[in-house]
Amino acid sequence: MSLQRTLSIIKPDGVAQGNVGDILKRFEEQEFQIKALKMLHLSPQQASGFYAVHRERSFFQDLVRYMSSGAVVVVVLEAPDAVVRLRELMGATDPRQAAEGTLRKLYATSIEKNVVHGSDSDENARREIQYFFSDSELLD
Ligand code: CMP
């Protein structure tokens, strides 16, 4: 598989718990290259726009409130098969289902406060990267 990019967000619980350094280290240990990175405090409007695909879901309002409750770290990662490999490293959405050694098993406390986001497809990765980064902010 050729190189692919994906978007990760270290969510407000990950930042508040002090997991940023360890999560970035694990990305690098797994040979993801960091191609862009920024710390943001999302507005409710930014969080709603990012998660627009979930707007009909029962948990949407809570998700927007949570994602705009504190700082996040937004990261563009590059690796062969990056979308699937990042999702493996994160573990299942619900930390109770997440495999041993995954980021969510290690750090997540609930299905909502699940520490980290990763794009679920190549198409969504492109959209999500563009949502947060201009071309000039992305390394070649
Ligand atoms: P993420 O992978 O960022 O994509 C959507 C997010 O919605 C998900 O992680 C969780 O934080 C949240 N989410 C998904 N399912 C539920 C649920 N059943 N209840 C509450 N939050 C959820």
Image (spheres, rainbow, N blue to C red):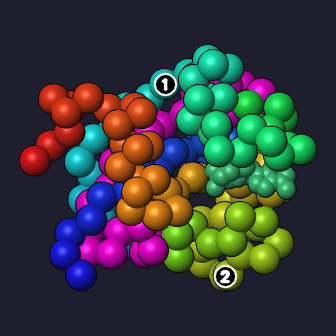
Q: Identify which amino acid the numbered label 2 is placed on.
A: Glu
Q: Residue at x 73, y 31 (%)?
A: 64
Disc 2 versus disc 1: nearer the observer: 1
* Left or right of 2 in this view: 42: right
Q: Which residue is mark 1?
A: 40
In percent of width and height, residue 42 lies at: 58, 23
In percent of width and height, residue 72 lies at: 55, 34
Distance from the alpha carbon under mark 2 to that under mark 1: 30 Å
Q: Quadrant of residue 103?
A: bottom right
Q: Quadrant of residue 61?
A: top right
Q: Identify which amino acid the numbered label 1 is placed on.
A: Leu
Q: Count how many numbered circles sit on residues in the image.
A: 2
In percent of width and height, residue 14 lies at: 62, 45
Q: Secondary structure at mark 2?
A: loop
Residue lying farthest to the right in this orientation: 58
Q: Earlier in the sequence, mark 2 or mark 1?
A: 1
Q: Secondary structure at mark 1?
A: strand
Q: Nearer the viewer, residue 60 or 101?
A: 60
* Crowding at mark 2 (Cα within 10 Å: few <14, some 14-19, many 20+): few
Q: Which residue is mark 2?
A: 100
Q: Is mark 2 within 8 Å of ligand 1?
A: no
Q: Residue at x 23, y 48 (%)?
A: 35
In percent of width and height, residue 93 lies at: 71, 64
Above or below — where is 121 with respect to 51? below
* Crowding at mark 1 (Cα within 10 Å: few <14, some 14-19, many 20+): few
Q: Residue at x 84, y 35 (%)?
A: 62
Magenta segment: does it hold 80? Answer: yes
Magenta segment: does it hold 71? Answer: yes
* Left or right of 43 in this view: 73: left
Q: State the extent of the magenta-drawn residues as a range.
A: 65-86
Residue 117 shows which numbered tag?
A: none
